[in-house]
Image (tube, rainbow, N blue to C red):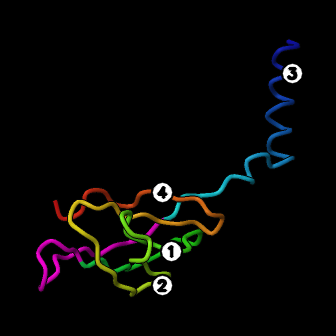
Amino acid sequence: MVAITVILAAVIAAFVLDMGSGQSSNAEAGLDIQENSSHSNLQDVTVTSMGDNTKAVYCGDSSSNSTTEVGGTFQCSNGSNIVGNTSDGGENVLSTDIGA
């Protein structure tokens, strides 16, 4: 009985104190990836949508190939990863090994 009361109190405290609110969500983006018409070793990456927490999308092998807005396009080498950057500085892979 005491154990059930302690567990119930912890669950209620978690909801009341909103203990999970400090966690950020991953970067999210819709991507259109097409082979570059001039260079077969490159892929053209166009961002079609971005999640609320997404600050930028870039080529994993070169952060200078990037965009911060929907409709932006950049090029990446075949085999690259596409990475998303969150507003709080986190990063996560959005697409792996493109064009391979």
Contact (CB < 8 A) between labels 1 and 3?
no
Residue 69: mark: 2
At x 56%, y 74%, the residue is: 55
> Taking 47 as reference, is 80 left or right?
left
Q: Which three-letter amino acid code belongs to the residue tagged 2?
A: Glu
> Taking 31 as reference, is 64 left or right?
right
Q: Earlier in the sequence, mark 4 or mark 2?
A: 2
- Nearer the observer: mark 1 or 3; the answer is 1
x and y percent of residue 48 in the render?
A: 37, 80
x and y percent of residue 31 in the render?
A: 33, 73
Contact (CB < 8 A) between labels 1 and 4?
no
Where does label 1 land, which residue?
56
Q: Which three-letter amino acid code belongs to the residue tagged 4?
A: Asn
Q: Residues within 10 Å of mark 3 (few under 14, many from 20)?
A: few
Q: Nearer the viewer, residue 52 or 85?
A: 85
Contact (CB < 8 A) between labels 3 and 2?
no
Corner quadrant of residue 4: top right
Where does label 3 land, which residue?
5
Q: Residues within 10 Å of mark 1 (few under 14, many from 20)?
A: many
